[in-house]
Amino acid sequence: MRYAALLSVLSILLATDAAFAQRPSTLGMSCAQAKGVVAARGAAVLSTGRNTFERFVASPRACLPGEYAYTAYAPTRDASRCRLGYRCDPVPPIWKDNNRFGFGGGLFHRW
């Protein structure tokens, strides 16, 4: 019984690992193809290198509350820096960070 349970858990882990291995790579696509994948899905996790990946979204509205949208670029087959859309990051932009420089008002604070 334990052997069957162990075998089923291992098969699930291997299947999950195989599913992640099938993530589309930007390096195998043209810039237009990669943009098309992100636009069609609204959000996509794409490999950007041998051991790297990124989540790209088509619109800043796809970010969760508290996340900020930043323009995202990735290398593709025909471009070293292709604009694919946006990436969502919980770190606020420098002009929204009130304490980054220690004077509590952000970059455009009046002294």
Image (tube, helix red, strand yellow):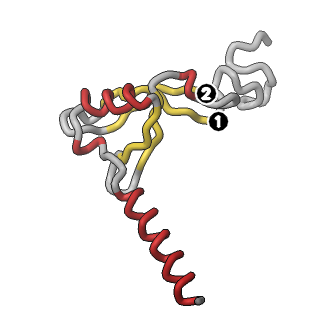
Residue 96 locus on image (x, y percent) = 69, 22
Of residues 80 and 7, which is closer to you in this image? 7
Of residues 83 and 44, which is closer to you in this image? 44
Tell me the element at label 1.
loop
Measured along the vertical axis of the image, is residue 36 above or below residue 52? above
Tell whether label 1 touches label 2 (CB within 8 Å): yes
| Number of residues whose C-alpha sits closer than 10 Å to that of mark 2, classed few (under 14), some (14–19) or many (20 or more) | some
108 relative to 84 in the view: left or right: right
96 relative to 56 in the view: left or right: right
Measuring 43% from the left and 38% from the top, which residue is drawn there? Answer: 44
Checking the image for residue 68, the label placed there is 2
Q: Residue furthest top?
A: 110
Measuring 56% from the left and 82% from the top, which residue is drawn there? Answer: 5
Residue 71 locus on image (x, y percent) = 46, 26
- The amino acid type, in three-letter code, at marker 1 is Pro
Tell me the element at label 2.
strand
Q: Which residue was labeled with disc 1?
A: 90
Q: Earlier in the sequence, mark 2 or mark 1?
A: 2
